[in-house]
Image (cartoon, rainbow, N blue to C red):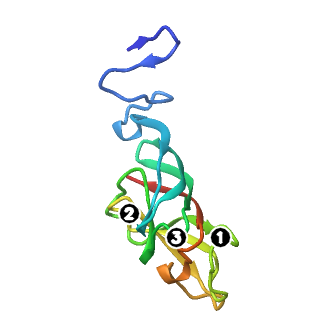
Amino acid sequence: MRITSTGQMRLAGAGITFNGDTAAANELDDYEEGTFSPSVLNWSGTYTTQQGQYVKIGKKVYAAGRIITIGGSGSFADFLQIAMPFVGSTSISSPNFGTWTIVAGSTGVPSSKVAGGPLGGPIANANAFMNTFDTGGNSGNWSASYCNASVACEFRFHCTYFV
């Protein structure tokens, strides 16, 4: 162990344990925070904004961001997903681990659909499915047909997942 000139403690080859705990499973062995450029999978166009932030503590990732497409620069296809900064655990089966919204007025959202909903997995390939509800309370994946690609679409999201 060494203390740097800025007062940070550095450990070589081990994590930090607290309160005398010696169990390796309880070590804090990874902490990272940063930015990433999220994207909407199944969008073929370009963006005006791709802002994302994350904090990774051990195996847990907190991520949030916003994405704005350039209207008329591409098209939406299939079900929409958001690319996350780290590959998720394959042991998670279709969880709802966050939420997303599409900013009101940015698309021609069908009146029968709620403009947002849960982010769902699996995220084994670092992608989160945008799920939604209709006015009858039924859920499903957000389909490309719900977005008007000729105008700018703004998506916002936040989530927590394990890697």
Q: Can you say which quadrant of the picture contains the N terminus?
A: top left
Q: Are marks 1 and 3 in contact (CB under 8 Å)?
A: no
At x 51% / y 29%, what residue is drawn?
19
Give how far across and how far down residue 48 sits, in percent.
55, 55
Among numbered discs 3 and 2, the one appearing first in the sequence: 3
Q: Which residue is mark 1?
A: 106
Vertical side of 38 occupied by 130: above or below: below
- The residue under label 2 is 123
Residue 72, numbered label: 3
Closer to the chain start, of discs 1 and 3, is 3
Residue type beneath disc 3: Gly
Q: Nearer the viewer, mark 3 or mark 2?
A: 3
Camera-nearest label, 2 or 1: 1
Q: Does residue 143 appear anywhere in the picture?
A: no
Badge 2 marks a residue whose secondary structure is loop
- Res 127 quadrant in image: bottom left
Distance of label 3 from label 2 (alpha carbons): 29 Å
- Where is residue 96 shown, x and y percent of the image? 51, 69
Amino acid on which disc 1 is placed: Ser
